[in-house]
Amino acid sequence: MVLLKLASAYTTALATAPLQTKSATAAIVAVVGDALAQRSDPTVAGYEVMRGQSFAAFGALYSGAWQHHLFGWLSTHCTGSFAAAQCTLLNQLLVVPLLYVPMFFLLSGLTRGLGLKAIVAGARQRYLPLLCSNWRFWLPVQTLCFACLTPDLLVPVTCCAGIVWNLILSSIAYSSNTKVVGGARPRRRLGARVGGRQRRLGSRIRQPAWRSPEGGAVDIEAAAACGLASGAI
């Protein structure tokens, strides 16, 4: 009985306030997916609030609000026997590469306080892996959704499937390849041979380092790629 009442209340909310309901649903689903990814990641000591907030914001704006309008437009303009395939291909081959993936990197980076240079560095490293994973997961799932569901249910059901996807998305976007050194970062010495003898140039080259939350030094290039700037996440 409780589940039936909740389902009835949710259906009513979809009818009376579809945009707000879908945005809230997408935000909750995104946070749940990211929380599962954080829990399964042995490198994450505790729940990272800023990381969860970035997924909530992205889920509400894109998965909820934007897809509410996008799926309605696709369902109206794609007709005929291959309507589901048309909707899926337009979304996955046009909207996702040009809007979804760039917007994810931009919004998640801004939410964590990263600069544009760090956001671009992370996007360059992870754009293609993220896009290919997106296609492997969503091409069959969205084709089935467009073929079987009414426009009102497309976003909520897609969000439910998105629990699994957000776990994958979180793992890809926040996979760490940083090298943390317990103490000071090793310094490089630049040598040159003059007259058969190697002379050390006077200055030592030091790479700037961010301090990790654990207190070690983190390579700045790797930190930019992974979003670890000034302990932002």
Image (tube, helix red, strand yellow):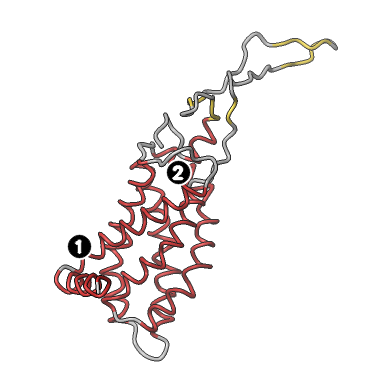
Q: As shown in the figure, which amino acid type bears the numbered disc 2?
A: Val
Q: Position of residue 5 (x, y in %)?
A: 21, 73
Q: As shown in the figure, which amino acid type bears the numbered disc 1?
A: Gln
Gap between marks 2 and 1 measured at Cα: 31 Å
As drawn, 88 above or below 105: below
**Residue sitting at the far front:** 1
- The residue that label 2 is drawn on is 120
How dense is the environment of label 1, judged by Cα within 10 Å: few (below 14), some, or many (20 and up)? some
Q: Position of residue 178 (x, y in %)?
A: 57, 36
Quadrant of the rendered structure where residue 20 is? bottom left
Q: Residue at x 75, y 16 (%)?
A: 192
Q: Residue at x 50, y 67 (%)?
A: 135
Give the position of the C terminus as an image quadrant: top left
Q: Could you tell me which secondary element the residue under label 2 belongs to?
A: helix
Q: Earlier in the sequence, mark 2 or mark 1?
A: 1
- Mark 2 or 1, closer to the camera: 1
Q: Residue 96 vs residue 131: left or right? A: left
- The residue that label 1 is drawn on is 20
Q: Residue at x 35, y 41 (%)?
A: 50
Q: Nearer the viewer, residue 137 or 91?
A: 137
Q: Residue 115 vs residue 153: left or right? A: right
Q: Residue at x 22, y 64 (%)?
A: 21
How dense is the environment of label 2, judged by Cα within 10 Å: few (below 14), some, or many (20 and up)? some
Q: Could you tell me which secondary element the residue under label 1 belongs to?
A: helix
Q: Position of residue 46 (x, y in %)?
A: 44, 39
**Residue sitting at the far bottom:** 81
Give the position of the N terminus as an image quadrant: bottom left
Q: Kindly indicate whether the residue at mark 1 contacts the one at mark 2 (C-beta within 8 angstroms).
A: no
Q: Position of residue 38 (x, y in %)?
A: 46, 47
